Image (cartoon, grey):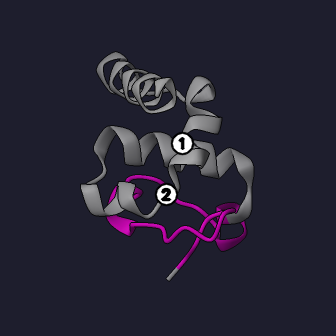
Amino acid sequence: MATTLFNIPVNEKLIWDYRFESQDFQTERFFKWYLARVLDHGTSRDIAQIPFEIIAKYLNSLRISRDVRAFWEWYFQTLYKG
């Protein structure tokens, strides 16, 4: 199974409409694109494979839906408030 820059397994069902070479999976550009795909279209299993620290680190640079962004901003604000 292919993995990303942070050794996160790639769900092939989330990238079916794009063609990538295996070396692409290890780039930050792919990772950010894939992370956005996971947050917008992935399952809870896909999201659970990504450490929340990584999601928080990249959140501001991702092209994701407004509702998904609002949820994660709320989540991290609540998480780090306490």
Q: Which residue shows up at 65% across the image and 72% down it? A: 22
Where residue 49 sits: x, y (%)? Answer: 44, 64
> Are dots 1 and 2 in contact, CB under 8 Å?
yes
Q: Residue furthest bottom?
A: 1
Q: What element carries label 2?
A: loop
The total number of labels drawn is 2
Where residue 80 sits: x, y (%)? Answer: 51, 30
User: What amino acid type is highlighted by mark number 1?
Assistant: Ile
- Principal secondary structure, stretch drawn in magenta: loop
Question: Callout 2 environment at 10 Å: few (<14), some (14 to 19), or many (20+)?
Answer: some
Q: Which residue shows up at 69% across the image and 45% down it? A: 29
Q: What stretch is highlighted in magenta?
A: 2-25
Q: Dot 1 corresponds to which residue?
A: 55
**Does 37 appear above or below 11?**
above
Is residue 52 in view? yes
Q: Dot 2 corresponds to which residue?
A: 50
Q: Who comes first in sequence, dot 1 or dot 2? A: 2
Where residue 10 sits: x, y (%)? Answer: 47, 67
Residue 35 on the magenta span: no
Label 1 to label 2, Cα distance in Å? Answer: 7 Å
